[in-house]
Amino acid sequence: LTPNQFEVEQLTGVRIENINDAQRACGILHDLGVPLVLITSIIFPTNAQQSQDSMGVFASERFMLQNVSCGIETESYEDEQRILYVPKMPGQFTGTGDISAALWLALTADSTSSLAQKLEQLAGTMNAIVERTYQASLEKLQKQGISSLEEPKDEATRKRIVRSREMQLIQSASDILNPPLRFQATKTSER
């Protein structure tokens, strides 16, 4: 499951304001039978780990453990949770959630990589795609005499800005096939 912060809050009823809230929300989804949750973007109101210009990407995986003691089999679980922070790019980019979900599906098909490695590959690839898209958008808009950092004064300009941010997937093929490692995932503390 690959919700963003708003979506996971709606699904679980947990307002996410810190890592403990993200852990609790993922725990609810795990309890419902979802073994792997990726929250594609989290912006905490206040966090010493996260700067104002970054957002968190949070992954949680539940492993079922089988215990046998005195001939009695019991089940328990263990959650592994990782977070990393990536820089926010100015503006809004349509399609990042869909691209993240597709990349995550491909990355999780690889059983040899750890959760941290998958998260780092995803973040590196998404950052490269969005960064390339942002740069291409600036160039397109500059040719049209539009500053993408200003609020559009009319609907036609707003539409040009949105169209200029078409995700640069073809141009990012090498980053998709060979994910750049730009960020390090850290293990979250126990709840």
Image (cartoon, rainbow, N blue to C red):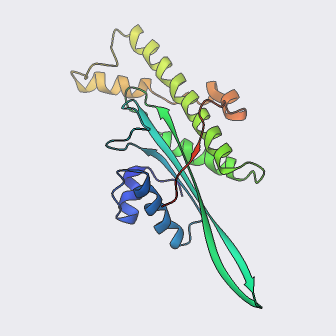
**Closest to the observer: 141 or 126?**
126
- Above or below: residue 184 compared with residue 152: below
Relative vertical location of residue 35 with respect to residue 51 in this rendering, above or below: below
Query: Against 75, is 63 above or below?
Result: above
Q: Quadrant of residue 11?
A: bottom left
**Viewer can see residue 94:** no
Can residue 9 be seen here? The reply is: yes
Residue at the bottom extreme? 71
Give above or below for 118 relative to 168: below
Residue under the point 50% across and 44% down: 57
In the rendered image, residue 117, in percent from the top left (x then y), is placed at 68, 43
Q: Which of 92 and 29 is in front in this view?
A: 29
Q: Position of residue 51 (x, y in %)?
A: 40, 32
Residue found at x 44% / y 49%: 4
x, y percentage for residue 180?
66, 30
> Is residue 177 found left or right of 51 in the rendered image?
right
Q: Quick check: 91 left or right of 127? A: left
Q: Total label count?
A: 0
